[in-house]
Amino acid sequence: MPAGISIDAAPPAASLDEAEAAIDRALAAPDAPAALTRLLAEDAPLYRGRGTAEAERLRGRVLAGFAKAGLPSAALPQVLAELETGLNPLVVAGAARALAGAEAPPAEALDLLAAAASRIRSTDAPTSPDLRPPLGAVTEIVLAMARHGAPAVSRLRVLRAEGGWSAAVTAALAQAIATAEAAAPKGCCGGRSSTLPVAPAAAPGAIDDLPIQDQSGAVMRFADLFAGRPAAIAFFYTRCMNPQKCSLTISRLAAVKARLRAAGLAERAVVAAFTYDPAYDTPRQLEAYGRDRGFPFDAHCRLLRTTGPLDPLQAHFELGVGFGPATVNQHRIDLAVTAADGRIVLSHAHRLWDEAEVFETLAGQIRA
């Protein structure tokens, strides 16, 4: 890759080494925090056409770069989302390192770090090749917790009490506890990130004529299902390997439907999810996936696919999804609640959403 090329326009054919070198150039740029933040977009050219393993390796490197460049508030939701649901040790470790670049990481980061350490313990692997000696992912998480000072002590002790850690992690826990105990309590940390939800600017009616198909095989236009009723619309795909993302999304949508039914509002709102992978996710595939997760199919509760390109839906809802040669190589969690006229009134991106909040928003739209 020529030295002067912008990483924002990096061709998918670039080798992995060339792509990593371009990330390093972004890190050295005067606007490094902003440049790295652009590279967190799941559909950034950096990842396009790559397999999942390569995309995750690059994403881990981008995240780790914030430790040196500084972590801007615009990138914090992506960092916390990786700690909340990430499974790849390199990516999760990169997110843990990124917090070192934050002026005031939220207090919830401690619980997310602790949960991440437990979640990836069985897949822990050496990472951070720029460090000598390289550290394991769980070790990096533990050290990131220690940087929070005294508030981290109790969480670190809980992790140590779980037992069964490798010798390296056990040593890191002892070191982290000593470091945290010696540190003064830090008053820098607030509550949950306030950067979400943020509603994208989508024009009502823009995708009314988009052809779609549900799990039964019925074909319709987008407006045939959604016009005239408020809706909770989420996004998933059946080949997703992270149970904290797509599988949990469908289960939580089912819980939203159950709340609507209990309130006598089930017929007055639509609860639906679109697949990112319409070529693979046939009606039969969608029906089986939903059934296995207790999704209560009815006229106003469906799993859907576009019958043509996904692009119009992706653009309308500003979805965070990237694609490799065969399928999705990375995606964020996305959910929108729309009003009866199609306006987006609530939008969640990156982080796990609260089914109670989604229900209350739908109920408010129904009663408006």
Image (cartoon, rainbow, N blue to C red):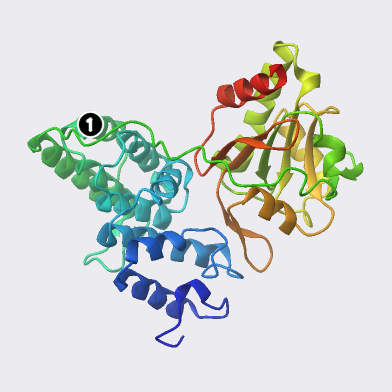
Tell me the SS state at disc 1: helix
Residue 121 at x, y percent in the picture:
38, 45
Residue 48 at x, y percent in the picture:
59, 69
Residue in the foreground of this view, choosing between 261 and 50: 261
Residue 18 sits in quarter: bottom left
Number of residues whose C-alpha sits closer than 10 Å to that of mark 1, classed few (under 14), some (14–19) or many (20 or more): some
| Location of mark 1 (residue) | 157
Q: Is residue 98 visible?
A: yes
Which quarter of the rendering shows the C terminus? top right
Task: Relative to 322, say whether 236 is above or below.
Answer: above
Task: Relative to 76, say whether 94 is above or below.
Answer: below
Task: Relative to 266, say whether 190 is above or below.
Answer: below
Residue 69 sits in quarter: bottom left
At a point 24% along the width and 51% down the height, the residue shown is 168
Residue in the foreground of this view, choosing between 295 and 318: 318
Residue in the foreground of this view, choosing between 302 and 89: 302
- Amino acid type, label 1: Arg
Q: Residue furthest bottom?
A: 2
Residue 186 at x, y percent in the picture:
16, 35
At a point 16% along the width and 41% down the height, the residue shown is 174
Residue 283 at x, y percent in the picture:
84, 45
Q: Is residue 300 left or right of residue 366?
A: right
Q: Is residue 9 left or right of residue 335?
A: left
At a point 86% along the width and 28% down the height, the residue shown is 299
